[in-house]
Amino acid sequence: MTDETENGPAGSAPRRRAKPSTDTVGTRKLKPSTLMMGHGYDPMLSEGSLKPPIFLTSTFVFPNAAAGKRHFEGVTGKRPGGAEGLVYSRFNGPNQEILEDRLGVWEEAEDALAFSSGMSAIATLFLSMVRPGDTIVHSGPLYAATETLIARILGRFGIHWLDFPAGATREEIDAVLQKASAGNVALIYLESPANPTNALVDVEAVAASRDAIFTGANKPPIAIDNTFLGPLWAQPLKQGADIVVYSLTKYAGGHSDLVAGGVLGSKAHIDTIRLMRNTIGTICDPNTAWMLLRSLETLELRMTRAGENAVKVCEYLRTHPKVEKVGYLGFLEEGSRQADIYRRHCTGAGSTFSLYLKGDEKEAFAFLDALKIAKLAVSLGGTETLASHPAGMTHLSVPEARKAALGITDNLVRISIGVEDADDLIADFEEALKAV
């Protein structure tokens, strides 16, 4: 431990403080990939352990009663800013706090929160922002569970919704937001690229439309699910989003061995969401947080390799006679609206794409059943390549008419490329296509 101490609230004993993280060397600001190795953690507060221990405890000892009272003033919202120390593992913990510090680094967010799953993050966000009678405006399609949460579950409590297609123009977005403004719009919720079509949302256009139609306290925050491209290939806070949502199960975790979620953004918004998380207990557990800390150290390496592999695989698939088209962001038509959004918003095409086979469900199933290296499983962003059938799996609960309108067809296969050898993957797809 360090020798540094700081006086706490009146009547409390001095408490040891963590050594500040090193974020710069000289005048050089350190990159996120470097900060993942130690940011937010002081080994001397944990017996010199190079890596954070897993803190498997349900509760934490207060130095005195006055300190305990002050912590709970923050936890309950009586005093802004949250707890000033560790209280109870439903509220916070060392592993979760280190993880949250590192999550915010990638997008230079003011604050971040970790959750037990991507959907618990999304549900907690919605519950903290909306009230009966409010309207959520969202892009479409969304992850099927998110659409279910908005339309079927929140709808039971008097929450309304309006949507616009992911690739909507400024004029189309204006029309939907103008219509919604007749009521109280509590949240604008986006997903880009859309799951599973890979259509991009123009976040800048959404922000400009919001700012033109809503003013002052009536201006709803913009939240966006950035799981498919973030944080390496897209950083929506730079385009005007206020809150970014992640399924940390995907690239951040990246080894298909955990389930977790994250939300990051301005401190004011995160404080609001934290109060709801404190109440309903959707924080991730210490072991999962520890595993995520380990995974974040290789995030850039894994995403870079997967992205390089995806380029090679998609180049092969796009010319195959049994392939109708490949919905890959690297193949957007020059001069198209989607290409313009990609140029302004993204630094890479990602490693998850939509493969449209010539045929329907029969051909899609034949292809999936013939794969040897790629695993037939839902999810994405792992070290292994995964393939699934959205219309019959992840989006099965979406009404048929809406699936048709959103392009979620029976011949669509979603593929997430991993870090295997690219030529081996191409050989696997080549053999599988012979079964179609």
Image: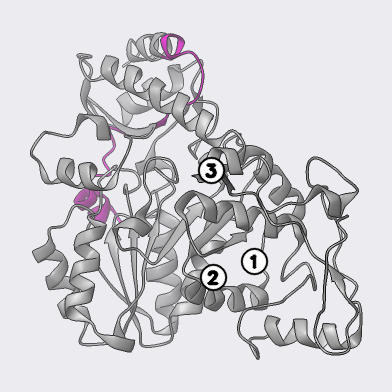
Kind of residue indicated by mark 3:
Leu
Instruction: Say left or right for 282 vs 87.
Output: left
Q: Contact (CB < 8 A) between labels 1 and 2?
A: yes
Q: CA distance from mark 1 to mark 2?
A: 7 Å
Which label lies toward us, 3 or 1?
3
Image position of 391 (left or right of 66): left
Which residue is disc 2 drawn over? 124
The residue pinned by badge 1 equals 282
**Residue type for callout 1:** Thr
C-alpha separation, residue under disc 3 versus residue under disc 1: 32 Å
Q: Residue at x 47, y 32 (%)?
A: 303
Residue at 25% across / 67% down in the picture?
A: 207
- The percent position of residue 402, horizontal first and vertical second, equals 25, 56
Is 223 included in the stretch rendered in magenta?
no
The magenta stretch is: 399-425
Q: Earlier in the sequence, mark 3 or mark 1?
A: 3
Label 1 CA crowd tier, 10 Å (few <14, some 14–19, many 20+): many
